[in-house]
């Protein structure tokens, strides 16, 4: 494999690994937000921001942790047939099916960038009582989809390397 491809895989996986390890602990942020929501509803006046901030936190957790999950092989597969295949056959199937993921992520990223541009241009705010600006979460969404796209490309390169009996 050309050196720039192995460097690309190494850099993408290093970024997604480190970010994924940080995002693993983001679940505690969501727990804290929802705990405060329960406490404030029970003992004080309900907070207007807690549910929406918990939703934004979940989006960040899911989309920024997704590339790490793909890298670790934690994505959902139909193991009925796949589990019994050889490493080479798995690489063939993965190298073919990853193109569907890349296409999907490309369309998703295109739409996300359009939505982010709209949010920035018109200072879009959420229609709730809290009314936060939407550009921060839309930026994180675009970043997460972009990192997932890079990880999918890295997985394709690794599958091609496996097919050529080269270990990256």
Image (tube, grey):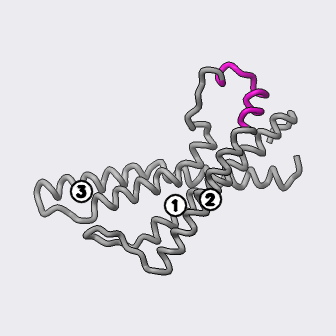
| Relative side of 90 to 165, left or right | left
Residue 138 placement (x, y as % from top left): 49, 66
Nearest the viewer among 23 and 85 is 85
Q: Nearer the viewer, residue 27 or 89?
A: 89
Magenta-highlighted residues: 82-94
Q: Residues within 10 Å of mark 2 (few under 14, many from 20)?
A: many
Quadrant housing residue 155: top right
Question: Residue beneath label 1, please?
Answer: 141
150 inside magenta stretch: no
Q: Residue beneath label 3, please?
A: 36
Tell me which numbered mark, 3 or 1, is placed earlier along the sequence: 3
Question: In this figure, which residue is indicated by the disc labeled 2?
Answer: 146
Q: Is residue 85 magenta?
A: yes
Q: Is 100 positioned to the left or the right of 35 in the image?
A: right
- Structural distance between the alpha carbons of marks 3 and 1: 25 Å
For this orientation, the residue located farthest to the left is: 43
| Residue neighbourhood size for the residue with mark 1, other residues' Cα within 10 Å, grouped as few (<14), some (14–19), many (≥20) | many
Spot occupied by residue 35 in the image (x, y as percentages of width and height): 25, 52
């Amino acid at each position: 494999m050309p050196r720039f491809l192995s460097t690309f895989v190494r850099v993408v996986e290093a970024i997604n690994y480190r970010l994924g390890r940080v995002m693993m602990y983001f679940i505690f942020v969501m727990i804290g937000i929802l705990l405060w929501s329960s406490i404030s509803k029970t003992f004080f006046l309900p907070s207007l921001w807690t549910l929406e901030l918990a939703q934004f936190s979940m989006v960040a957790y899911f989309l920024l942790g997704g590339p790490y999950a793909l890298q670790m092989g934690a994505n959902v597969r139909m193991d009925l047939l796949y589990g019994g295949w050889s490493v080479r056959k798995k690489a063939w199937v993965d190298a073919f099916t990853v193109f569907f993921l890349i296409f999907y992520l490309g369309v998703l990223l295109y739409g996300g960038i359009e939505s982010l541009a709209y949010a920035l241009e018109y200072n879009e705010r959420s229609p709730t009582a809290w009314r936060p600006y939407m550009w921060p979460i839309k930026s994180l969404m675009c970043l997460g989809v972009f990192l997932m796209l890079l990880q999918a490309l890295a997985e394709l390169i690794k599958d091609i390397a496996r097919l050529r009996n080269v270990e990256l």
